[in-house]
Amino acid sequence: MMDMETKFAGLLRDRNLKATPKRLELLSVVANYHTAIPYSELQKELHHFDRVTLYRTINALLDSGIIHKASVSSDEVYYAMCKEYCTSECHNHKHVHFKCLECLEVSCVDVTNPIQIQIPNTIVKQVEIEVSGVCSKCI
Amino acid sequence: MMDMETKFAGLLRDRNLKATPKRLELLSVVANYHTAIPYSELQKELHHFDRVTLYRTINALLDSGIIHKASVSSDEVYYAMCKEYCTSECHNHKHVHFKCLECLEVSCVDVTNPIQIQIPNTIVKQVEIEVSGVCSKCI
DNA sequence: AGAACAAGTGCAACATTGTTGCGCATTGTT
DNA sequence: AACAATGCGCAACAATGTTGCACTTGTTCT
Ligand SMILES: [Zn+2]
Ligand SMILES: [Zn+2]
Ligand SMILES: [Zn+2]
Ligand SMILES: [Zn+2]
């Protein structure tokens, strides 16, 4: 089993991004967090990063399709690892984002049947679904 | 046919908000815009509003369920009138938000069959769907 | 291993937006 | 007309987005 750091370095180099300690650390924080990680938590865990570095690192990883945003109900922004192979062109997620209204945790949930939505006279390219409710721990 | 201003004043008073000229003007701008209106456009059309007044007016109307946010793909925030009867407790929209990737317009689109999403071991309370693609004008 | 280049990072600086308090103005009501 | 409750503009501060520039580091090629 390849260790995490090596895997992350590979993800980065695949996209022509240098595998720097900052990026590896951020990725490890995002990947090891049990759910999608809120921005404030990322800030807390990486308080030794310069504000601008955090900003630019997040953007680079978003752009290159290594992490993705899950901004449910336009409150705080959450970040999670991309599971599929995403690129700067498109994030190909076949999952929905679920936010628990009690504990405020956000997680990526796989769906079995792909959601099909048709809108007359338009070409649908991407569908983002954000579900909120109560998670199993909070029921 | 009741004129717009009277209708908006009614919406406001129903929710114990005073029908002030500022609120009526904002509502008229939102309602007369052909699609969901981006924040920047709202700012432009209401540049004579104090920044804080715009902020508080939007919040008051969001809270009371007269307008709603449509923040597709977490870019700019868009606002649109609530068509159903919404309250501060819940916005009961049975429509999806469609953003054209060409002209960047966002619109509320009614769907015929209500979307049903089930996630094991959770209680689903609200589903937000954001679709992006190409609209009829841009095809 | 060392040099050279491209890319990443910290710092400073400024722009935009969110947020609050307070005194004056306005609305809805008696 | 007068009152009470609310709304509004202004000032002030906080948080975040964004850029430029000089210095550091990762990667590649001797
Ligand atoms: Zn992705
Ligand atoms: Zn996700
Ligand atoms: Zn609504
Ligand atoms: Zn809508």
Image (tube, coloured by chain):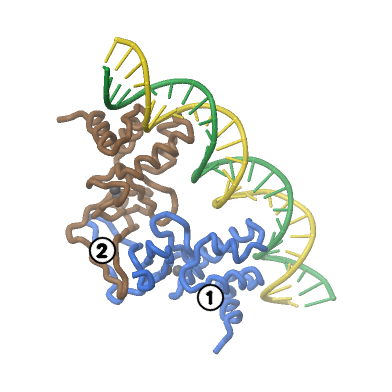
Chain colours: A brown, B blue, C yellow, D green
Residue at 22% over, 53% down: A110
Nearer to us in this view, A32 or A8: A8
**Which residue bears the numbered disc 2?**
B117
**Which residue bears the numbered disc 1?**
B32
**Residue A43 position within the rendered picture, expressed as x and y whole percent measured from the top left:** 44, 36
Residue at 14% over, 30% down: A1
Nearer to us in this view, B136 or B93: B136
**Residue B120 position within the rendered picture, expressed as x and y whole percent measured from the top left:** 21, 56
**Residue A122 position within the rendered picture, expressed as x and y whole percent measured from the top left:** 31, 71
Q: Secondary structure at mark 2?
A: loop
Picture layout, residue D8 above or below residue A95: below
Under mark 2, the amino acid is Ile
Q: In the figure, is residue B114 to the left or right of B75?
A: left
Q: Earlier in the sequence, mark 2 or mark 1?
A: 1
Q: Residue A34, labelled with which disc?
A: none
Res. A22 visible in picture: yes
In the image as oriented, which residue stretches furthest toward the bottom?
A: B1
Under mark 1, the amino acid is Asn
